[in-house]
Image: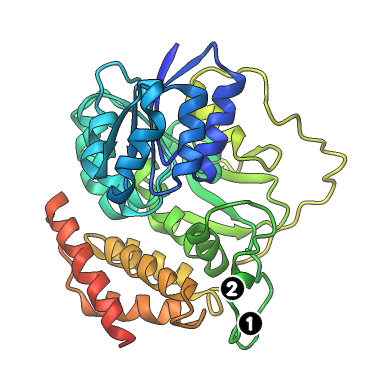
Amino acid sequence: MKQLVILGSTGSIGTQALDVVRHKRDEFKIVALSANSNINKLVEQVNEFKPEYVVIMNENLVSELKDRVYNIGTKVLSGIEGLEFISTLHNVDIVLTSVVGMIGLRPTIAAIREGKDIALANKETLVVGGSIIKDELSKSKSRIIPVDSEHSALFQCLNGESRSAVNNLILTASGGPFRGKKKEDLTEVTPEMALKHPRWNMGKKISIDSATLMNKGLEVIEAHYLFDVDYDNIKVVIHPQSIIHSMVEYKDGSIIAQLSNTDMRHPIQYALEYPNRTESLIGYLDLIKYNTLTFEEPDIETFECLKLAYDAGKVGGTMPAVCNIANEEAVDLFLNNKIKFLDIPIIIKEAMNNFKVNYEFDLDFIINLEKEVREYVRNIIK
């Protein structure tokens, strides 16, 4: 039985991961859970799975959480130190990191140092600290098994193949809620409009990133670090049906694709059970039903965030971190109606132009850089 920690258990990925565990109770034991502030959902999960530990990031909710789980015997921790603690418990086999944003970096590094396998659903970890993570992995027995549907697909398509035979990685994208629109069509986009993703049920931040195509840009950077492939050999195609989750083109002209129903429980189950495959929880793909699969080139003139992410990745060093942090802050400003939808790439570009690139950095440097970039972005709109 695999011992599992879920960071971000009340979010979209976390709740679906617990559904996998719910159907595979003979395979997994939940050792610890964490949430930011959704205390009601967290208490429900603690009641059901009875973990040894639970972490709440919102310090103001610690006392209430302790009172509400007292009879269960689950120990309550808080803050980033709590995340690091549960990620390094001696009896833990897998840490599923599904928190949103840069907060996943520190517990992921801590878990790798303790030899835990990482089921990675927090792309910002590699975008911001890819070189740090790769260095830590080189000194550890840990493995990263990607949970994002696109990277899970690439992982599966690359399995057993020589990396030297790879020509291109091909990441598919649904196109988001504004596929086919031009800039003049997006001047009055509201957060409510941008949150209506045509295929996936995701959290607010990721939904906005999908609408701007920044989500795909961050996935390009993540793919670079996961699979050691140059940016020029990582392509993005718009595939509205979202049935092909990604593909690998090999030098002999073959393209291997991974297809499945559109349900995040599939890549979650694959990552948690790897290298085994067991009965599907989501049913099987009806190819007759999906008898037409289409592909389009992404419009980087309208959806400039994708180009900015490529640019940041190619510059390297701390530039992907600047791009990611500025995007996080800009998305928050948009969700709070403080900027327009089309202001998001403008703000990111300004931040990328303002900050000097560093090629030698550690975790402390990234933490300080985060504060500086966030302050810079906030000052832009004052």
**Helix, strand or loop under label 2:** loop
Could you tell me if the residues under marks 2 and 1 are in contact, i.e. CB atoms within 8 Å? yes
- Which residue is pictured at 50% across the width and 49% down the height? 168
Q: Which residue is mark 2?
A: 299
In depth, the one of 38 and 379 nearer the eye is 38
Q: How many numbered discs, if any? A: 2
Q: Position of residue 173 (x, y in %)?
A: 60, 57
Residue 159 seen in the current view = no
For badge 1, the amino acid type reads: Lys
Q: Quadrant of residue 350?
A: bottom left
Q: Which residue is mark 1?
A: 182
**Helix, strand or loop under label 1:** loop
- Which residue is pictured at 48% across the width and 79% down the height? 337
In depth, the one of 245 and 22 nearer the eye is 22
Q: Position of residue 32 (x, y in %)?
A: 37, 27
In depth, the one of 205 and 159 nearer the eye is 205
Disc 1: CA contacts within 10 A as few (<14), some (14-19) or many (>=20): few
Q: CA distance from mark 2 to mark 1?
A: 9 Å
